[in-house]
């Protein structure tokens, strides 16, 4: 869903770190393992097998598109020369977001016979900032690994954890406010229909 991609998930950071360290082929294995694990461990049953397969396929395609964009613009793996690597990494994030949002908002609804969200381009704009934040964390982690700065990890982990919690709370408040506006809009439409009768 759009809400899922509006929030930076730790799994995205892991996937993007593996993408920038090992390349798209290895990342596909990480992404599929994550999707299947979420589907198998979901106690609410909100991940039927067909949806898990569609999500896994979307992860594969998104990773390949990100890999193509990254390679086409001269992206390197594991060791970055700054600032030149910023553009290939940004292109990879945009390509990944585009495919994931298009699959969540267009392809999955078509396969599950649900209405397509016509405002899916806005969903991409909402998802990209969080994805850029996650990619920045992945790049920071790779730089720590590349330069063997292990002493930085404990110092950075605590503030990052609290910043992530605050970020999630903020996104949840925005989503709740958006849902409330949708409910109020639906009620207003229902009242105007009743008034016209």
Image (spheres, rainbow, N blue to C red):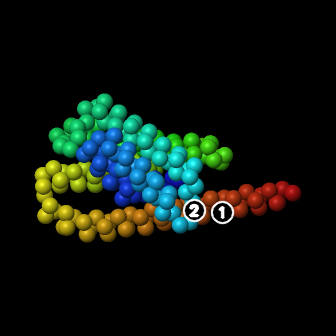
Neighbor class of circle 2 (other Cα within 10 Å; few <14, some 14-19, many 20+) is: few
Neighbor class of circle 1 (other Cα within 10 Å; few <14, some 14-19, many 20+) is: few
**Residue at 53% across, 45% down:** 54
- Across and down, in percent, residue 92 comes to 34, 40
Quadrant of the image containing the C terminus: bottom right
**Residue at 37% across, 67% down:** 166
Element type at marker 2?
A: loop
Q: Which residue is mark 2?
A: 45
**Residue at 55% across, 57% down:** 47
| Front in this rendered view, residue 152 or 195 | 152
Residue 178 vs 19, above or below: the answer is: below
In this rendering, would 151 be left or right of 183?
left
Answer whether labels 1 and 2 touch (C-beta < 8 Å): no
| Front in this rendered view, residue 26 or 169 | 26
- Across and down, in percent, residue 152 comes to 16, 62
Q: Which residue is mark 1?
A: 184
Query: Is residue 124 among the parts visible in the rendering?
Result: no
Task: Report which quarter residue 62 is drawn in.
Answer: top left
């Amino acid at each position: 869903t759009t809400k899922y991609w509006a929030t930076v998930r730790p799994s995205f950071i892991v996937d993007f770190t593996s993408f920038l360290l090992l390349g798209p082929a290895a990342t596909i294995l990480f992404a599929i393992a994550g999707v299947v694990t979420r589907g198998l461990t979901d106690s609410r049953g909100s991940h039927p097998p067909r949806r898990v397969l569609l999500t896994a396929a979307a992860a594969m395609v998104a990773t390949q598109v990100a890999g193509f964009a990254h390679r086409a613009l001269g992206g390197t793996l594991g060791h970055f020369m700054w600032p030149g690597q910023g553009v290939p990494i940004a292109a990879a994030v945009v390509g990944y977001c585009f495919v994931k949002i298009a699959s969540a908002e267009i392809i999955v609804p078509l396969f599950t016979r649900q209405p397509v969200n016509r405002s899916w381009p806005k969903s991409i704009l909402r998802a990209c900032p969080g994805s850029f934040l996650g990619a920045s964390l992945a790049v920071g982690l790779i730089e720590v690994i590349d330069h063997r700065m292990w002493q930085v990890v404990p110092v950075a982990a605590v503030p990052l954890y609290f910043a992530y919690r605050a970020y999630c709370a903020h996104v949840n408040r925005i989503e709740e406010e958006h849902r409330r506006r949708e409910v109020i809009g639906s009620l207003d439409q229902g009242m105007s229909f009743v008034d016209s009768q």
